[in-house]
Image (cartoon, rainbow, N blue to C red):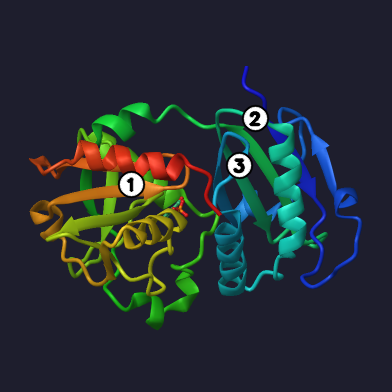
Amino acid sequence: MAPTVTLLIQPLPSGEVGADLDATFREVDASAPALRVGELSTQRGDGIFETIGVVDGHAQEARAHLERLRNSARICELPEPNLPQWEAAIARAVGSLPATGEYALKLVLSRGVEHGPAPTAWLHASAAADFTAAREHGIRVVTLDRGYARGTAERAPWLLLGAKTLSYAVNMAALREAKRRGADDTIFVTSDGYVMEGPTSSVIIRRGGVYATPAPSGAILHGTTQQSLFEHVEAAGGRTEYRDIAVEELTTADAAWLVSSVRLAAGITDVDGTSVPYDADETRELNAYLLSPRD
Ligand code: PLP
């Protein structure tokens, strides 16, 4: 069986320096009980997380993930994470993994246990699923109404739309709905017909040589993979933009992808039962870049 690494972390306040960081982690057996029944993360999904891809012993874009963890904490009014502590925990976990292969490293920061102690935090690294088929042959998607109009995030910040919270039951339900409809994945759209994101991924389209993705306005997560791919495209002289994307554009684009930290780039072959152009060569090139060490 592929190895796993699980660290329970005693979260330090942000800004606390000079502590013996290694002494704030405790490696535990992932199959043994580790959380209290009063954990608000499990009772209410009240916490935040990040999933980082590890490729051949390198944690990809760790800093960007930690910045997003900090942003999610701010939105959810959780204590600000101590980023050097998380960096040390990531380094310790990655150091315990094999030097080759793909792993998913999940960081969780929870509001803690009802009536304390709080917050609680842990990290769990396990082998990534095999995404060869999605990377090489693409995926079929359905569009599903997320139920919110554009501008909802600004009007109703308590919905926490721009935070990566542990409350992913809706996202998982959307994936089941996609399967029921004979597809592999979902693209959420606003109730007024604009592309948002996948339940676990960002959307990128290419149209007339320009790569576009919806602006991270607070209604969706700002994907680390999407940002990394835009840097890659721009470095090669390509053009990128953040803009509103009407749902109809998914079928008229020259190519489209769902991108995320562990599956990487999955080209879209079919939207709501309609075949769309799929660029196998470009997808291969994008994944070769995403598999290279990235910071
Ligand atoms: N949007 C949502 C809702 C996600 O859950 C994820 C990742 O899990 C993404 C976008 C893509 O983010 P990243 O590229 O940082 O993995």
Q: Which label belongs to residue 127?
A: none
Residue of label 1 = 174
Query: How far from the left and from the top, in percent, is residue 100?
Result: 59, 28
The part of the image, by quadrant, that contains residue 218 is: bottom left
The Cα atoms of the two marked residues, 3 and 2, are separated by: 8 Å
Position of the N terminus, as image quadrant, is top right
User: Could you say where residue 274 lies in the image, as x and y percent from the top left?
Assistant: 8, 42
On screen, residue 93 versus residue 149, left or right, reads: right
Q: Label 3 CB, ligand 1: below 8 Å?
A: no
- Residue 291 at x, y percent in the picture: 46, 40
Task: Say which residue appears at 57% left-offset and 53% top-offset.
Answer: 50
**Could you tell me which secondary element the residue under label 1 belongs to?**
helix
Q: Say few, some or many: other residues with alpha carbon within 10 Å of mark 3 (under 14 / 14 to 19 / 20 or more).
A: many
First reached walking from the N terminus: tag 1 or tag 3: 3
Q: Is the residue at mark 1 in contact range of ligand 1, meaning its CB lies under 8 Å from it?
A: no
Read off the residue under disc 2. 99
Look at label 3 and name its amino acid: His
Q: Secondary structure at mark 2?
A: loop
Residue kind at label 1, given as amino acid type: Ala
